[in-house]
Image (cartoon, helix red, strand yellow):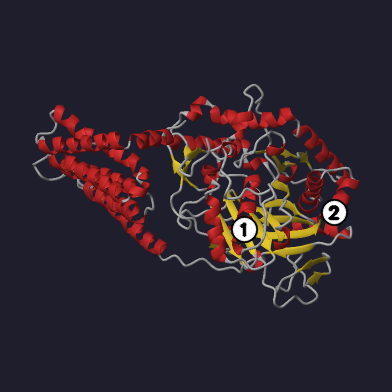
Amino acid sequence: MKHCDKCNITIETKQQYCPLCHQVLSGTGDADKMETYPDYVSPRRMILPTTKKVIMFVSILSILILIVINWAGFDGRYWSLIPIGGILYFWLLVRIGVFSRRNIGFRFASLTVLLIAFMILIDFEGESTVHGWSIDYMMPLLLMTCNLAISTTIWIRLLDYRDYFLYLLVIIVFSIAPIVLVFTKVVTVTWPSIASFGVAIAILLFIVFFFPKSIKEEFKKRFHA
Amino acid sequence: MSVKTTDWFRLDNSGKIFPEVSNQRETNTFRVQVALTEEVDPDILQMATLGILDRYPMFKVRMKHGFFWNYLDYNTKPFQIQKMSHEVCSALNPRENNCYLFKVLYRNNLIAIEMFHSLADGGGVVMLLQSLVYEYLKLKGYDVSPDNIIKTKYERPVEEEYEDANSKYYNAKNRKHVPEQRAYRIKGTMLPDNLTGLISGTMNTNEILELVRSKELTMTEYFAGLMMHVIYNTQIRYRTHLKGNQAPVKIFVPVNLRKHFPSETLRNFSNFVKTNMVMSRDDITLEELFDHAKQEFKNGMTKEELIRKMSENVAFEKNVFLRFMPYFIKRYALKIGYNMLGMKLNTMSLTNIGKVVFPKSMEPYIFDVTAAVYSGKYNTVNCAILSYRDKLKISFSRSILETNMEREFFRHFTDKGIDVSIESNFVEEFV
């Protein structure tokens, strides 16, 4: 035991000074005794943030340059939106698709919605004279793919299937959008929308028939007030 | 019906606010730690933890976002104990521990539980730790018995342990909001990297009890009064003219409501009493502060007052606008509410967990018990007190470099001839 003559306390430590008054301790400690609390271990040097900073700097600079060029030679079209959308899409893809630890259902659902949004942007802001391919083909087919992807995940990881339900339901609700567009005659090619809607309804029926309790439970949890 | 391990739980009243107001510095975690008389075997501790978690479905959870409120959903992933690092009451990292809201730490002869405040308060954690230590000793092959003090893994969890007792005992008619003034803040040099300093002193319980009783006070009243005197002496005295020193010194003392209401809940069920005094005078004596603390405790511990404070919080939560506000908006409302009812209104917190009792058969294996609460930007020094047999352990955690509060506090006792032995994590060495 060591002793601080100033504070009149005893302490068992290998340090030479009193933690209260920072004066030198007298007496000798027990050499075999370990310190009560662990030593400091400095946190690992983070390599990622520097890389992130560089990419972020380049992205923001590019966006600014694109806006300036578009504005300087403005001819009635906002073409810079497409590369800017591309840059933002890249960021969200990395953020949600690669680094996010959220569950895979969430990642599938949000990346699909993002991709659809980006495709619609290219479709309607692009140079091409052929418009509408994004909502004719891309949207319904992407939604269908996402539906199947989440369902497959649930199928494979049956153990915690309840975690993914919410996202499956969200995507199924989104799958109604193409069929609405069919009825409002915005979509000219109807078969992808109808197929996508059919798949969504099939999956929904499957859940309702085989997991009715889980659905109810999940709703209760997510929407309790 | 008993609780299954696949249930989900609503957050309790106090638990709802913490997820939104916690960050790396204000972690809202606290630690209860047991020192055994022998070295801890991590493998056996891991087994004991897994065994005990089935007894406590309430703790086998992770936090999830709902549309209106966060909630606790059962966690299917395994729990992993961790080696104690230099961090004390640090923020929980969901990647580190499969999203569990507490940690089990070990080192040499120490077993510690650090818990996020959304899940439980000190009372609940002490129960969990008792069970864990019992299970550990049992697996080690020692002849220990639970003696109705400890909840073992063979019991069935009961519903009462999971109730939100605040909403059960609250009274909608007695919920007047009393506006409060911002409290005095203890100043110092902030420690970098969210480090926390920990200094605990062990004294003899009986000696202190004798001292406290000679003044006709309870232990908590004595410490609250003494703490105010320490703050006065180290921070305010001789500088009473400064503007910041005109703010009242308020010591936040949690009250375990399980002792006042018939509840067995493991979740948050505590309220508080506060001392409240503007200390910008030159002639404040210790006796005067003892009287003040005694008076505040007398006023604050009446049933009406406890229910009023409880109802004030519950009423905030039950507000229809708040309830049906989507969560992404609500989080800002919660932050504002917390600033009204929360942290900046306290100078420091002084938690008296009280006596921790282990069965006779376990006592030879347990050296001492320690508690600590986090310290942050506003409450830079906090104190937790706990007694086990004849050891009274007072732990200061601090987010500032200065130790004069601790020094003056313990010198008060050594001047009276009471032996104090100190432990420290020597946070000075880290910076």
Residue B378 percent across, percent down from the top left: 64, 48
Does residue A77 appear anywhere in the picture? no
Q: Which residue is mark 1?
A: B112
Query: Residue visible at 56% across and 52% down?
Result: B52
Residue A158 percent across, percent down from the top left: 33, 48
Query: Residue visible at 61% across and 35% down?
Result: B340
* Total numbered badges shown on the rendered structure: 2
Query: Residue visible at 13% across and 33% down?
Result: A187
* In the image, residue A67 above or below residue B110: above
Q: Amino acid at mark 2?
A: Asn
Q: Quadrant of residue A30?
A: bottom right
Looking at the image, residue A51 sits to the left or right of residue B260; the answer is left
* Label disc, if present, on residue B206 of the rendered structure: 2
> Mark 1 to mark 2: distance in Å?
26 Å
**Crowding at label 2, few (<14), some or many (≥20) Cα neighbours within 10 Å?**
few
Q: Quadrant of residue A139?
A: top left
